Amino acid sequence: MITAYLTHPDCQRHHMGPDHPESPLRLEAIHARLMRDGLLQQTMQGDAPLATDEQLSRVHPPRHLRALEECLPERGLMPLDGDTLMNPDSLLAARHAAGAVVRGVDQVFRHQADNVFCAVRPPGHHAEATDAMGFCFYNNVAVGAAHARARYGARRVAILDFDVHQCNGTIDIFRDDPEVLICTSYQYPFYPWRYLRNEHRNVVDTPLPAGTDGAAFRRAVEDDWLPALHAFKPDLVLVSAGFDAHRDDPLAELCLDDEDYHWVTRLAMEIAALYADNRLVSVLEGGYDPDALGRGAAAHLKALLGLPFA
């Protein structure tokens, strides 16, 4: 497998204060672990470009994009809500994060890579069409899906989200869109407390109670996701890869291990191999314990590279 790895130094310039869990240290932890394990050297590394206004406006109305720009502070921090703050470089980082998924989509459709991992921040799956929230400004995976449809004519895009939080933003943008299938596993009931009542035919919900371990997670994903994915037959698989369902993560109470992330990545790859000519693009979402995040990302990348877990 040819695996591309996309990131950008400007993603480190966004910060929300010294005690905020969504910090530049997250990408440092991933990079250090991948280097230590000899995985990064096996990828095709590249810089994430800036998403353009046209690419962002496919999922976020221009007036919302302008409103975010107007909130950008000249110095210090500007709170958008209790969890989500902007510094002067936040939207620069966010444009690189969204642009990474666009570049990844280009790479898999142009046969430059089989799959792609976008190690970028800020995350995106809580960003709704007109609402930045939950550490997220632009919905990175949604921008990538819209680009695939506009540029390459993709008609069946599957978005698999295994973060500990439901992808409310992705649901908000694509709800009831028959050309997008959203599969989302998350701790229930838990933030963001939106879209928890599934009323949308294109959303496969996998709510998990606190304390759920890897075996129960795997059974739920197989039972809920696989029938829908085989019926849908996606021509592109996008992954919102959150590592905050790890047993060591401080922000939640699911109990996944590193090997579970390798397993669910392999499941996504098998669907991509069956129906999408291997086309799979993954983008980082949550994960707030540096060591667990690094190990989870390493397990994810091992799978993308076609390597066994151990």
Image (spheres, rainbow, N blue to C red):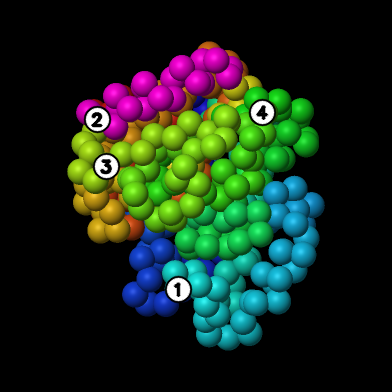
Q: Position of residue 49 (x, y in %)?
A: 66, 53
In the image, residue 287 above or below residue 208: below
For the point 40% across and 25% down, which residue is it? 224
Is 55 on the left or on the right of 254, as rendered? right
Name which of mark 1 and mark 3 comes first in the sequence.
1
Say which of marks 1 and 3 sits in front: 3
Query: Label 4, on which residue?
Result: 178
**Callout 1 touching callout 2 (CB < 8 Å):** no
Q: Alpha carbon of mark 1 to alpha carbon of mark 2: how far?
A: 33 Å
Mark 2 vs 4: CB contact within 8 A: no
Front position in the image: 71 or 294: 71
Looking at the rendering, the stretch of residues picked out in magenta corresponds to: 215-233
**Residue placed under numbered mark 1 in the picture:** 82
* Residue identifier under label 3: 209
Residue 65 placement (x, y as % from top left): 72, 64
Amino acid type, callout 1 = Gly
Mark 3 or 4, nearer chain start: 4
Q: Amino acid at mark 3?
A: Pro
Badge nearest the viewer, 3 or 2: 3
Front one among 287 and 58: 58
Q: Using a 10 Å C-alpha cutoff, classify the residue at mark 2 as few (fewer than 14 neighbours), some (14 to 19) or many (20 or more).
A: some
Q: Which mark is residue 216?
A: 2
From the viewer's side, name the closer residue of 77 and 43: 77
| Residue drawn at point x = 71 percent, y = 25 percent | 155
- For the image, the number of numbered tags is 4
Callout 4 touching callout 1 (CB < 8 Å):
no
Q: Amino acid at mark 4?
A: Pro
Q: Are marks 3 and 4 in contact (CB under 8 Å)?
A: no
